[in-house]
Amino acid sequence: YVQMVVRSRFPELHHGKGENDDSDSDEDDDHLDMDSMRQKLSNLFHRVNEVCTAEFQLISNVFSSPPVGKGDATFDLTSLSDAVPFQVARTLLQRVISDPRDGLQARINDLLESIDRRGDFDAGAKKLDTFVVIHEKAAGLFTMLKESAQTMLMANSKSRSDEDQRSEEYQAVSDENKRAVASLIQYLTTQEMSLSSSHRRGYLNLELRLLHHECCYCLDRTGAKLVMPKGKETARHNQTLGQGGGPATYEAPVMPLDKNHLKKVGFSGLLNGVLKSSVLRQPLMHATDSLARARLMFGMGQGFGDMDSTARVITGIFSQMCTFYGNSFLFPIIEVLGDLLDTKPPAAPPNLPFDENSPAPDLGVDGSFWVGIERIHSAAKAFDRELWAEQRKGSERVWEILEATGSHTSLTLAKDQRVSFFQELEERGETAILRALDTISTHISWVLVAGSENMLKNRVLKMGDRSGGPYAVPAGSALDNSNSPAVKSLTFCLRAQFVHIQAALTPQSLSAFWTALSMRLYDILGTRLLQHYYVSMVGAVNLSRDVEALRSVAMLAGTDHQHWDMLRELLTLYMTPPNALKTILVGPEGDPNSGKGLFGQAGKVQALVFMSRRVDYRVKVGNVIQKSAWVVELLEDLGVPDPTDGNVNIAMYSAQSLRNRRLKLS
């Protein structure tokens, strides 16, 4: 009977491969039409269900024992309990589905092998789609077969007479038949698991391998070079994802971008290559496709162990993407961005002032650096949004899938991977941004110190002025209403740089960066003032204007700029005549310990050190430099020693030291 059904209703299964060899060959040569293949599979699965459903009805009527009626032979309890219909149905299903030569599973394997014969990655991608189509159609087929087995094979027993149904003997037979149906359904479940298990194992390895290939190809076609793994790194390690016999995963090798090549292409090559928005998005698109296919292949709890397998597979895909998007992609780029910055300023001093009608000099940090930082930051946010998507209901991304599986282990592992990815990216980003801060700082010194002193040197050579720095302006000199050329040029550059930085960093990062830059700017000016410059009363006016200009640009962002406020107070030491300095230092009461005046605000030592930079603090008598008489009298009157008689630790008067002192007092 089974052979007759197969011959008459399934000629394509009965005749085997020979009849379809030509079509298979054509399918190998031509482009694989996924829509056509899907339709053929759908038709075949529908036909299997239709035929088996009809045959179940026939089997129930033909192979079961005849009903016992009046005038019939003696009631035979043994014949009623005969399970022949279920044996026939099982034989039919085994022949149609799992026959090793001509069964449905053999036909599916033939299809997959025909794709394998192509041997390229495009064929691999089509094989992935084929896996999903087969899984989708097979799941529907087995569901319908189970329903048909339960409804059709029990139909004959339901049609028996009421008298039979009331008998205890018949009830026993009915229970046995139910057990037979349950056994048949269990057989179908086993066949479904066997079919899906073999396909899932092949699918997963291919999925991870092709995902790695597609991600690497996204970078390769931009012209970037990848560092090939060496030695044992090329090995593909298999790890068991499920309990014994579970699917095994392919471990992708780490192939990072070649940093030497990235350095050669420079900022422009990076922005037009691997940092293009489309290139940054493409790996994420491939990953989301992989997640969607994995959900279809491993389901959300269908069958035995699917929840656990689904969780492990999704975690494996996410882990591979964390490794690729971090170690292979973003990490090398952000390191190169920092390496491209040259912290050393030009050897020649700048030609001041800069032309404000032209683009501002970049202070060693090209605007493209900040564009690159911004794109990496956007890519990291897109990675989290498109793959992790925490608390986004209906996103069908990693977090939601793992939450649905209930696997706390897999969710914890995935969270650790995510945290590790962002921590490493943040650390590398901080290193690159710190290098940018160092570069800007050295170029600030280049403009403010080298540029200013070069102009002063030329003035001395031309006019024979005594050089005590740009603020040792002789009494009676005309006051200029503008800032010094160095400060004017520097603020012009810093404001232009701020625009780029503001666009690249988050408000919190911008505040921290600009506060640090403000402190470094203060330290550069303060160090030069305390070590090399002298200030006259006329020069103090110019210095005050420059400090206001620098303070203004320093306060574009950030919150802690009190070091500039302190400096403004200390500048009064240069604008005050000697006979009024005591009041400035200790307050109107004249008590050094009152906590008033600059002694109370800045501290005794700092106030006296700054005061020592007055041009009239020391005078030359003969060939000897000594303190002015008013200095000696003032120090004796205050009862304090002169801290400049010994070595002065300039670091004690840095912006950070002022902050620490302020925090200690508070």
Image (cartoon, rainbow, N blue to C red):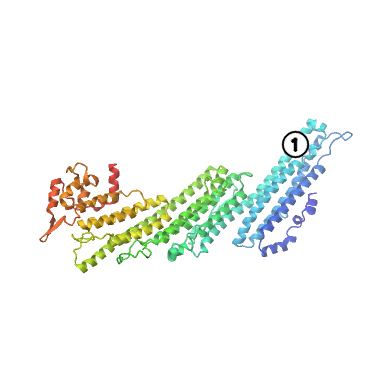
Quadrant housing the C terminus? top left
Query: In the image, what residue occupies the spot 30% across and 47% down?
Result: 659
Residue 639 in picture, x, y percent from top left: 14, 45
Name which quarter of the figure residue 177 lies in.
Answer: top right
**In the rendered view, does 255 fall on the left or right side of 202?**
left
Q: Residue furthest right?
A: 71
Q: Position of residue 503 (x, y in %)?
A: 43, 56
Q: Quadrant of residue 601?
A: top left
The three-letter code of the residue at mark 1 reads: Glu
Pointer 1 local density, CA inside 10 Å: few below 14, some 14–19, many at least 20:
some
Q: Position of residue 366 (x, y in %)?
A: 39, 62
Q: Is residue 653 above or below residue 213?
A: above
State the residue in front, 443 or 93: 443
394 or 584: nearer the viewer:
584
Q: Is residue 434 left or right of residue 87?
A: left
What residue is rendered at 72% in x and 62% in y? 23
Residue drawn 41% across the image and 52% down it: 427
The residue indicated by pointer 1 is: 176
Residue 339 shows up from this direction? yes
Q: Return the residue nearer the eye: 340 or 148.
A: 340
Q: How many marks?
A: 1
Residue 507 drawn at (x, y percent): 41, 50
